[in-house]
Amino acid sequence: MVQFETWKRVLVLFVMLVGVVFALPNVMSNDKDGAPSFLPGQPINLGLDLQGGSHLLMLVDMDVVLAERLSNITETIRQDFRTKKIRFSGLKISGEEVVITLRDAGDKEAAEQIFTDLGTGLRRIIDGATYRISYDEAGLAELQTRTLEQSIEIIRRRIDPDGTKEPIIQRQGKDRVLVQLPGVDDPEVIKRLLGRTAKLTFQMVDLRMTAAEALDRGRTPPGTVLLPGDDEDGRSYVIEKRVIVSGELLDSATASFDQNNRPAVSFTLNATGAKRFGKATGENIGRPFAIILDGKVVSAPTIQSQIFANGQITGEFSVAETNELALILRAGALPAPLIVLEERSIGPGLGADSVAAGEIAAIVAIALVIIYMLLSYGTFGLMANVALVVNIILIIAALSAIQATLTLPGIAGIVLTMGMAVDANVLVFERIREELRRGRSVISAIDGGYQRAISTIIDSNLTTLFAATFLYIFGSGPIKGFAVTLAIGIITSLFTAVMVTRMLVIIWLERKRPTTLEL
Amino acid sequence: MRLKLVPSDTSIDFLRLRQVAMVFSGLLVAGSIILFSLVGLNLGIDFRGGILIEARSTAGPADISGLRGNLGKLGLGDISLQSFGAETDVLVRVQRQDGDEKAQIAAIEAITSTLGSDFDIRRTEFVGPTVGAELAQKGMLAVVCALLAIMVYIWFRFEWQFSIAAILALAHDVITTIGLFALTAFEFNLATVAAILTIAGYSINDTVVVFDRVRENMRRYKSFEQRDILNRSLNETLSRTIMTSVTTLLALLAIVVFGGAVLRDFALAMIWGVLIGTYSSVFVAVGMLSRFDLKRTMEEEDEAEGAR
């Protein structure tokens, strides 16, 4: 056993060399240029808690989408039945179903045809002349997937319009989106950007009844709806339900100023939008139309002349608000509102402080352990210390190579591994001491020490690896980072204790050929 | 000269202290369970839901009592303020607001605007009730699964008696750590769950080392009394047990002193874990082991293997 084959020596040196190469970018990189190009790896990925940034877990409100879809289905059925002159009663949405009853059984075939034309993913329950239409499982899943994908796309366009910020935007489960954005100073901005769906429509204001009258009578004329204004004065408007132009027809939107030099948003419509808008404004000169954002009337200007592609949205805006509004309008409307379920935002200052504190703690920990080992085991302690340093280099290299994310608990994990990494060496050294006390020769004591300690080392490390595995499976965010560093630390310390220290001990034996050993 | 915390040849009769240790551990565990059920844990927002904001005063030490007055006027319910690390730093905790998630976001905005320009917001954390419940569930699952996996592994590598003794020692460590958190009212959060699992990993590591030696000595000294074998195994591994505990404690001490306020509670929990884990490997794990008739089981096992 007291020999270390050449191939093993080559392997150890090779692993150490690879470790140094992958660890180097962490020392040599600067903030601007990243790693020097002659090195293969990248520095360790710092987690949001060290780098600063925002983590937002959001729920896509599927109920809103479903309600909208059911309402669309209801309107389609109503129109198609009228066109085909099918008589019906009780058309309404009840829970997650659209309910309709035919008056004349003879219309059954025509009605069935209309229902089939609604598309796939729907289910019909027939109860005499009453039909209940709802989404089936596949239809619901498809609706959720599509909504989620659209949401992710819109979120990306809103928070990273230039594609430079490297956000992580991930689907989580069936109705959640995880957004991680490194290096954001003010997380409130992101929440404002994502806080509204930004459904923009232009609709005519109905002048047959004032809002006050509508409130008095408790109803509005047919085909109209009462909408609140965006101002704080609590004004409402009677608005025609028919939409002239909606947000999808926007070509561009930019922050600008109106003729009174107040902040405004200028927009350009695409060809379809311009045609529709031109027709509507041409027919309605002198009447007001409403610009409606998320169900609130932002402004209701009177049409002075026919407008085609270009227009302006004015209101009580600050410059910052027009900038954000323009960005949101360009990005498009979210299919459903987003609800923040979890937020963790770390300022860049705190992140930098944490890194600095972690570094100091790590250096002090290494120094203390090194001194203690040296005092306890002398030359052998020195060899264990070399292995400890190699171990740290390997941990850094492994984290860099797999681009794992280093979090604050992760730093604690590394520091903890340092304390535990020497355990394998301690086990071996204590065994060697025992063998020496039993009167064995130096070589046979060292041989026996390694042979007997190895199964203990493997048993004890494997059990810790179990704990790390479960932390990884069930942990989230920073805890996952802790689990990864802990697991890597266990594996590298196993390697350094069993291979590196042993190689050093054997080289030392070959050189010195000691006949006695003080340990 | 070598630094030796433990003399080379000790022959301490650890098992003589078995009864005392059993009573001591029993009281610790019972006390922990009572504290846990009566006082409960100071659950962090990870599990309870709520808002946490860390801010640093830009104008000298933070005026905590003044802030308490101003924030109290917001009507956000139970608000706790504490200084955090440096005297300029303050940690604001707000209970979960009534109403939906929008109400929580509004509360965050109200607090940050009250803190105003005198404070630099360093950290904002908000956990909604749904996510909080999920995180709690996952944390429990992680601890339970890890304990089961360790038990199965020990069973696989040793005899079933070892597995039982190890899992009792482990449960002892986990329960008393939870008890410590109930007693000190340290915040119990996701990082605490990580600390508990790491403590479990460390403690089992220690236990396995002792068990390995017990198994080896059972085979080597067949004529010895079981009690003597157990004591001998503990004495032989004592030097290593102390050595590893001290190195780990040194590393943890560095985190407590230099690692910053966020890691301090984590490291303190770990220090407790190292102490209790070391104690339980010796007294609880081996103490339990001494109640079984290991010699017969191992002889039967060896005969079975020999017959094959």
Image: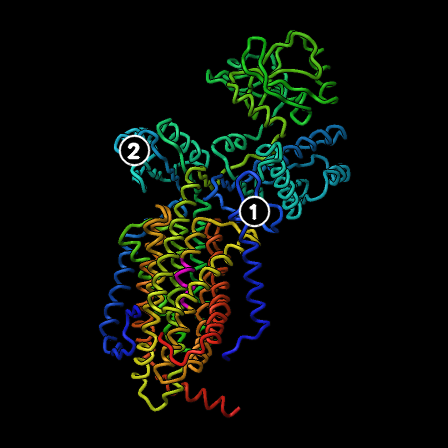
Q: Which mark is residue B62?
A: 2
Q: Which disc, if any, is residue B115?
A: none
Q: Secondary structure at mark 1?
A: strand
Three-letter code, disc 1: Gln
**Which scheme is used to colour this image of the protein?**
rainbow
Magenta part of the protein: which range?
A416-423
- What percent of the width, then of the height, locates residue A130? 66, 40
Q: In front here: A447 or B130?
A: A447
Q: Is residue A281 placed above or below B44 in the rendered structure? A: above
Residue B106 belongs to the span the image colors magenta: no
Mark 1 falls within which chain?
A
Residue at (69, 21) in percent of width and height? A269
Amino acid carrying mark 2 in the image: Ala
Q: Residue furthest front?
A: A512
Query: Which image quarter is the N terminus of chain B in?
Result: bottom left
Element assignment for label 2: loop
Q: Chain of mark 2?
A: B
Q: Residue at x 44, y 82 (%)?
A: A444
Task: Examine the rendering and report whether any part of residue A70 can be seen.
Answer: no
Circle 1: is it few (<14), some (14-19), or many (20+) Cα within 10 Å? few
The reply to the same-chain question for discs 1 and 2 is no
What is the x, y in percent for residue A512?
A: 45, 75
Count the marks: how many?
Answer: 2
Q: Position of residue A374 (x, y in %)?
A: 36, 65
Closer to viewer: mark 1 or mark 2: 2
Percent x, y for residue A185? 47, 33
Q: CA–CA distance between discs 1 and 2?
A: 40 Å
* Residue A172, numbered label: 1
